[in-house]
Image: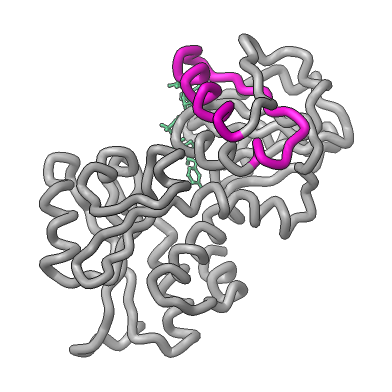
Amino acid sequence: MIEINGKTKITGLYGYPVEHTLSPAMHNSAFKSLGLNYCYIPFTVHPDLLEDAVKAIRALNLCGVNVTVPHKVKVINLLDEIDEEASFIGAVNTIVNTGGRLKGYNTDGRGFIQSLLENKILFEGKNILIIGAGGASRAISYYLIQKAKKIFLYNRSKEKAETLIQDLKKIRNNISLNLDISSIERFDVIINATTLGLKEEDPLPFDTSLLRKGQTVCDLIYKKTRLLEEASKKGCVNLNGMGMLLWQGIFAFELWTGQKPDIEVMRNALK
Ligand code: NAP
């Protein structure tokens, strides 16, 4: 356990619910290993009380917090400043309190890219299919579009995909809308950024019999989803969202403390 005293700096997580979170284990282990007098606490923040909770960051002089479902978008209007990446994504997952001034960041996209890099998954010059157009899709596509040969985007709600495509075209014009998920064999990398794998029945987003060896399949969910199991059977490289979770946490840690955490300590805490 971290020893709390009068000088302890408080960070934490605002979400609803937060009972499932792995972040306290990850951050508290990292604070402890560096001997930093910080602690990370999960806060159950009801959506009706988000504004009060944000005011409390200043009132209680919290160092900063992570923000998760369902507050990532709504919190934007309650902050003093938003960095460029979070502003494009339209969602904040990390708040830093500097003398009462609250700045919002989004470390999810960078976290995903770092997870690809450390797993030696190539994405530069590749044809990438992204399924989903929610916050996580926006976060990763902001980076992927800058390096991919081409991004193909599919989403159940077409209008949402079209809006994201219009936004991404301001960065680079190498993206197009997919109206269905067929011809899977065309893509080098396939990324599921939907919540499908969180459902009990864990439905597949497309016909996985079309996958071929040599393709890479990613799911942003922390566990090995049915999609990843099927991809693995087909000989595809596969990656779940655990690395993304780790690295988004590392970047948040650096924003709060100005220090580099021990990555293996955080990884082991997640395991
Ligand atoms: P979100 O903003 O709510 O977006 C959800 C997406 O899933 C939308 O594109 C939605 O399509 C799609 N979807 C939901 N149910 C569907 C269904 N039955 N069939 C087809 N599409 C469906 O959520 P998010 O924040 O982007 O999160 C997406 C996933 O990423 C979640 O599973 C989350 O756990 C994961 N994630 C992981 C990390 C990490 O650190 N590893 C970080 C952030 C998020 P519509 O637009 O049509 O509704």
Q: Is residue 233 visible from the viewing direction of this image?
A: no
Q: Is residue 180 left or right of residue 9?
A: right
Q: How is the image coloured?
A: one colour
Image spot of residue 27 (x, y percent): 43, 70
In screen coordinates, is 181 left or right of 202?
right
Q: Which quarter of the rendering shows the C terminus?
A: bottom right
Q: Residue at x 38, y 66 (%)?
A: 24
Where residue 28 sits: x, y (%)? 40, 75
Q: What residue is shown at x 37% (from left), y 47% (from top)?
A: 92
Q: Which residues are magenta?
A: 144-171
* Quarter of the image where one finds residue 260: bottom right
> Residue 91's image quarter?
top left
Q: Quadrant of residue 252?
A: bottom left
Name the residue: 37% across, 56% down: 94
In this rendering, position of residue 97 left or right of residue 242: left
Query: Residue 188, relative to residue 261: is it above or below?
Result: above
Query: Looking at the picture, does residue 206 appear above or below residue 221?
Result: above
Q: Is residue 236 above or below residue 166?
A: below
In this rendering, position of residue 174 left or right of residue 90: right
Along the viewing direction, whichever of 49 and 44 lies nearer the viewer: 49
Residue at 56% over, 60% down: 247
Q: Is residue 24 above or below residue 49?
A: below
The residue closer to the viewer here, 64 or 240, is 64
